[in-house]
Image (tube, helix red, strand yellow):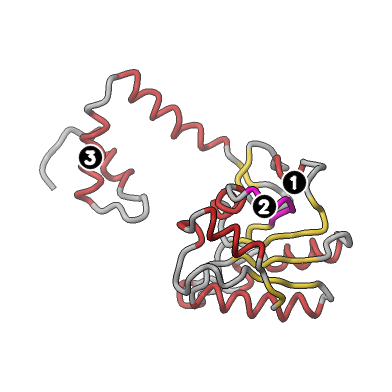
């Protein structure tokens, strides 16, 4: 890499830690930040620095500003429904449909032993504990992307959940195979939620 002042090198190294950002893209981002007005740059820095105050909800494992997130604290949510998602960002996608009003649990990924995602690395034990403690939950919705790893996770969890005597459903096949739930539009996702089927 060409010789730049140390702050630019440091910014490039930091930006390079983001997924999908290589050295050239990181350098381009650093120069884009340098073109911002000082006030705008300080706002970006302050916003990023504020991320250190984000914690994980003790109940559902989504990102939150307190030990219990807003959804888990909301008494209007349907406590009989528990939707299992791979990542916290999937909750925002499902919430955007306006159809689902139950509770959530973030698994922390999907089963993928090659990349080290085994049941002991995910929130599988926490899911079992929650279902044993919370007798109100009548239906568990498995909301995973319809790819190989999502399907493997659905099969694994549906067997486990049947042993616990819980009704288990999955998103309807409205999502195309190989699609990522994060990029599904609200209409497709709403249709998939409405037409979910038992596993």
Task: Verify whether residue 132 appears in magenta.
Answer: no
Q: Is residue 101 magenta?
A: yes
- Left or right side of 173 for 115: left
First in sequence: mark 3 vs mark 1? 3
Measured as percent of width and height from the top left, residue 185 is found at 49, 55
Number of numbered callouts drawn: 3
Residue 59 lies left or right of residue 98; in this view the side is right
Label 1: element kind = helix
Residue 74: x %, y % from top left: 77, 41
- Specify few, some or many for label 1: CA neighbours under 10 Å numbering under 14, 14-19, or 20 or more: some
Above-or-below relation of 163 to 65: below
- Residue 178, relative to residue 39: is it above or below? below
Mark 2 → mark 1, Cα distance in angstroms: 17 Å
Q: Which residue is mark 3?
A: 9
Residue 193: image quadrant is bottom right
Q: Quadrant of the C terminus?
A: bottom right
Q: State the extent of the magenta-drawn residues as a range.
A: 98-104
Residue 126: quadrant of the picture: bottom right
Q: Is residue 163 above or below residue 94?
A: below
Q: Position of residue 133 (x, y in %)?
A: 86, 61
Q: Which residue is mark 1?
A: 72
Q: Which residue is mark 2?
A: 99
Element type at mark 3: helix
From the viewer's perspective, is the residue at label 3 or at label 2 nearer? 2
Chain-order first, disc 2 or disc 1: 1
Looking at the rendered image, the disc whose residue lies closer to the viewer, 2 or 1, is 2
Residue at 61% x, 70% y is 172
């Amino acid at each position: 890499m060409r010789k730049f002042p140390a702050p630019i090198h440091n910014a490039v190294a930091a930006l390079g830690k983001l997924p999908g950002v290589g050295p050239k893209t990181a350098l381009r981002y650093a120069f884009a930040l340098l073109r911002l007005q000082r006030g705008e740059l300080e706002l970006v820095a302050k916003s990023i620095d504020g991320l250190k105050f984000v914690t994980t909800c003790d109940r559902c494992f989504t990102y939150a500003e307190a030990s219990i997130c807003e959804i888990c604290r909301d008494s209007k949510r349907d406590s009989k429904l528990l939707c299992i998602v791979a990542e916290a960002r999937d909750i925002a996608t499902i919430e955007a449909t306006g159809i689902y009003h139950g509770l959530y649990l973030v698994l922390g990924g999907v089963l993928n032993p090659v990349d080290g995602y085994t049941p002991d690395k995910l929130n599988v034990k926490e899911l079992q504990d929650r279902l044993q403690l919370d007798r109100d939950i009548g239906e568990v919705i498995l909301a995973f992307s319809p790819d190989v790893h999502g399907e493997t996770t659905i099969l694994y969890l549906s067997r486990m959940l049947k042993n616990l005597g819980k009704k288990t459903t999955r998103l309807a096949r409205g999502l195309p195979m190989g699609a990522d739930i994060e990029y599904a539009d609200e209409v497709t996702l709403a249709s998939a939620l409405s037409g979910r089927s038992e596993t």
